[in-house]
Image (spheres, coloured by chain):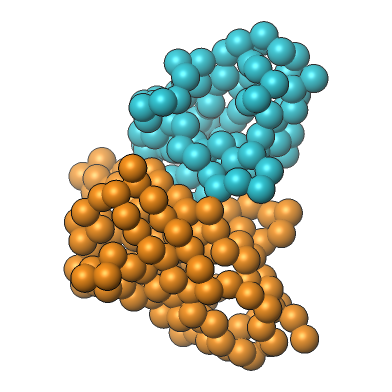
Chain colours: A orange, B cyan
Amino acid sequence: EVQLVESGGGLVKPGGSLRLSCAASGFTFSSYSMNWVRQAPGKGLEWVSSISSSSSYIYYADSVKGRFTISRDNAKNSLYLQMNSLRAEDTAVYYCARDVRRPLSSSLYFDYWGQGTLVTVSS
Amino acid sequence: SYVLTQPPSVSVAPGQTARITCGGNNIGSKSVHWYQQKPGQAPVLVVYDDSDRPSGIPERFSGSNSGNTATLTISRVEAGDEADYYCQVWDSSSDFGVVFGGGTKLTVL
């Protein structure tokens, strides 16, 4: 059974930092690209960042570029998100999600999601 | 960047058919995916590649995509289908370009 378990969320002051983790199990982690998707309270889903299976390709949403860093450790079956210079608008539940992509058909979707971890940025 | 437009809410009586639309410029040329999210829970994939269903998703959930509109259809709606539904595409012509629609709240009357 595929499982994704996020941790590391909490309350942080504006300008502060936080590191999220996602522990994966039930599949060959090193074979899949992974993502972070967030959801502000009462709002919709927003893709944040993606990392390819070997960490060769990394992408960020414009809203977090230069402040967040995605990484992974395939030996530990773990995904990370280092969040610096946090702002109030970064307050959200952060989900770890596995993706399935077929570039030739321009298809990419998220087939498994973690339960999410809440990040609150407030003074 | 690419924009997906969903109605904020759709209401339907139990046993009826719910249709949730997702509008986008020439969306028919893209692969559309749909997620169901119940309160306090993570999203769940219910339709991928316009009309395919993951294992475990009831046949009552189906999808179509043509022109400027993709549609998620839920037949014989049940109380347990009440949730938020999001469409999503990958706009590979832009910088990575994963896009979600704003979400539709399905209310079962």
Q: Is residue A75 above or below residue A34?
A: below
Image quadrant where residue B33 sits:
top left
Q: Residue at x 74, y 28 (%)?
A: B107
Residue B90 is situated, as x and y percent measured from the top left of the image, at 39, 49
Instruction: Residue at 74%, 81% (x, y): give it.
Output: A122
Q: Quadrant of the C terminus of chain B?
A: top right
Q: Is residue B4 visible?
A: no
Relative to B33, is B102 on the left or the right? right
Residue under the image location 66 percent in, 83 percent down: A12
- Horizontal relation, residue A11 to residue A83: left or right: right
What residue lies at 64% left-to-right and 90% top-to-bottom? A15
Q: Is residue A35 visible?
A: yes
Q: Position of residue B41 (x, y in %)?
A: 60, 46
Q: Is residue A41 above or below residue B75?
A: below
Horizontal side, residue A21 vs residue A26: left or right: right
- Image coordinates of residue A60 in percent, x first then y, are 42, 71
A26 and B52: which is toward the camera: A26
Q: In which image quadrant can residue B81 be found?
A: top right
Snapshot quadrant of residue A55: bottom left
Q: Position of residue A85 (x, y in %)?
A: 58, 88
